[in-house]
Image: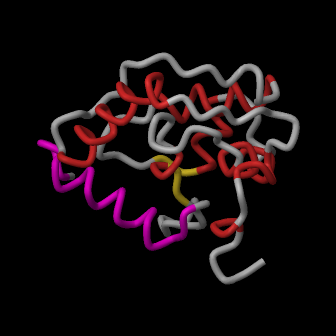
Amino acid sequence: MGKEGCAKLSLRTFYPDSALIWNPQVLVPYIQELKEYFAGTRKNFTLPIEINKVCSPFQQQVLEKVAQIPYGKTVSYGKITAAINNPGAIRAVAHAVALNPVLFFIPCHRVILNNGKVGKYRLGTKVKARLINLEKSYSHDNS
């Protein structure tokens, strides 16, 4: 793998048994919410996301906690392990976050290393830092 880790790998690499179906009509509202997110007018996504068919129960548990991270805030992997009552599972949590099938909608970019550094991201560390900074710039509480 290159410098950015799994940034160059296809989603199909992580979910080889799942069918990816292109349906523009279904995507329209999701695209609209993404546009609003990047414009800073949407802080929470409201459309249904089904991950139970592609995620293990453990990954679902982790991603449910990740989905609760407030807009403009970051949480360490260690805090996620504590939230799921499994403090020794840092690597497993990091792996579950890395396999997030719905970037942005479940904001895994808000999960950072325990030392406060950004850490890896499927789209690259620069994109992760930009997303964190984007949210902070639009957040009313910039602390």
Q: Quick check: 46 above or below 63?
A: above
Q: Which residue is painted at 34% across and 65% down in the image? A: 130
Q: Quick check: 143 above or below 54?
A: below
Q: Which residue is painted at 45% across and 42% down in the image? A: 104
Residue 5 rendering spot, x and y as whole percentages: 70, 72
Q: Nearer the viewer, residue 30 or 70?
A: 30
The answer to whether residue 132 is left or right of residue 81 is left
Q: Mainly helix, strand or loop, the magenta region?
A: helix
Q: Which residues are magenta?
A: 123-142
Q: Nearer the viewer, residue 98 or 14?
A: 14
Residue 127 rendering spot, x and y as whole percentages: 43, 66
The answer to whether residue 91 is left or right of residue 143 is right
Q: Quick check: 122 above or below 79?
A: below
The answer to whether residue 84 is left or right of residue 35 is right
- Quadrant of the rendering where the N terminus is positioned: bottom right
Residue 87 rendering spot, x and y as whole percentages: 74, 41
